[in-house]
Amino acid sequence: MEKKAAGAIISVVVPAYNEEAVIRESYRRLKQVMDGMDLRYELVFVNDGSRDGTMEILRELAKADPLVRAVGFSRNFGHQVAVSAGLDYARGDAVVIIDGDLQDPPEVIPEMVAKWREGFDVVYGKRVKREGEGLFKRLTAFLYYRVLRSMTGQPIPLDTGDFRLMDRSVVDVIRSMPEKNRFLRGMVSWVGFKQAPVEFVRAERFAGESKYPLRAMLKLAGDGIASFSVKPMKFATVLGAALTAGAFVYLVVSLCLALIAKAMDPWHIALAGLLLLDGLIFCVLGMMGTYIGRIYEEAKRRPLYIVSEEVGFGSGGNKTETEGLDD
């Protein structure tokens, strides 16, 4: 069914961490794009505990523009949590998630809204080209999405990030999912609904440094795999069974050789094999520990984030501080 755009509100959620060099330009381009559309809108910036002047700039923008709202965390909680907070505070009929570094172009938003009007509940940005990135970055990104998809078993679209538009019905479902170790693109894929891509060219950063170096990408991949797949545990079971069978065969063969060639001492080889098995056992225990650790994190029931400041929400705000901590 076609979306009724008359009177609709679009919320644009922008997570920001140490983005003082780009946040003004990000606001300018978002403002230019949204003003050119026949829709009401709000810009919701989430300051993820920045150590630079990002929050000061957001205060200035919110003071000068009533359509700008800013949420400040008490410390850095991470990109996925910042986006989740933005979803909590957004009040639009549809919500656009876009990073503040301008690698995902705001000019694609009207095309996403057009798809939403056609009846799609999720419209995600699909990268067809990555400008300003070296061979290593492009290669690791290529492998990242494909390994992640094969390991999780979820139909996560290839070459996509968190740049997307979601209908309010989808946002409400995502908000109802309480897990702490969040992997939003996997969560959005898991909930289903009617989804469609919009292709775009990923630009070079306008300014500043990437907040997703290789280490952060590996952590995000780990979050995605552990949150949506038990394949590592199954792999550990198969590996353990295979190694047990192999060790038994090796033991029988070593004993036979020792009896046939009495001058041969097989115990050095056996010791090496034992050390190898010990190493593999520790790897398997590490996989198990990852899942147990996540259970521990969930069991503590701590708030997902802590808000220290709300700007531009008026006296009542979009939600109370208690609600923000409970979600």
Image (cartoon, rainbow, N blue to C red):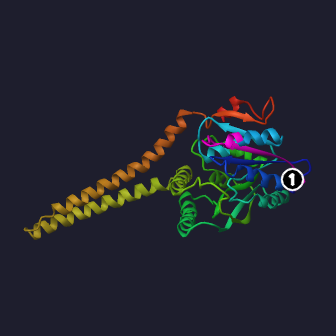
Looking at the image, which is closer to me, 237 or 204? 204
Q: Is residue 102 left or right of residue 233?
A: right
Quarter the N terminus occupies: bottom right
Residue under the image location 53 percent in, 35 percent down: 299
Q: Residue lying farthest right?
A: 6
Can you give x and y, in whole percent of width and height, for residue 58 in the image?
73, 42
Q: Is residue 117 left or right of residue 259?
A: right
Residue range corresponding to the magenta coloring: 36-56
Q: Which residue is mark 1?
A: 35
For residue 261, side relative to residue 285 (left or right) = left
- The extreme left residue here reads 263
Q: Is residue 283 visible?
A: yes
Binning the other alpha carbons within 10 Å of mark 1 as few (below 14), some (14 to 19) or many (20 upward) gives: few
- Residue type beneath disc 1: Asp
At 65% from the left edge and 67% from the top edge, which residue is drawn? 131
Question: Count of labels shown?
Answer: 1
Q: Is residue 65 above or below residue 126?
A: above
303 above or below 215? above
Residue 256 picture location, percent across and down: 15, 67
Element class at badge 1: helix
The location of residue 220, given as percent across then percent down, is 55, 53
The stretch drawn in magenta includes residue 95: no
Nearer to us in this view, 73 or 191: 73
- Residue drawn at (74%, 53%) of the image: 25
Quadrant in which the C terminus is drawn: top right
- Res. 96 visible in picture: no
Which image quadrant for residue 47? top right
Identify the residue at image location x=61%, y=34%: 303
Q: Is residue 49 magenta?
A: yes
Q: Picture coordinates of residue 313 (x, y %)? A: 79, 35
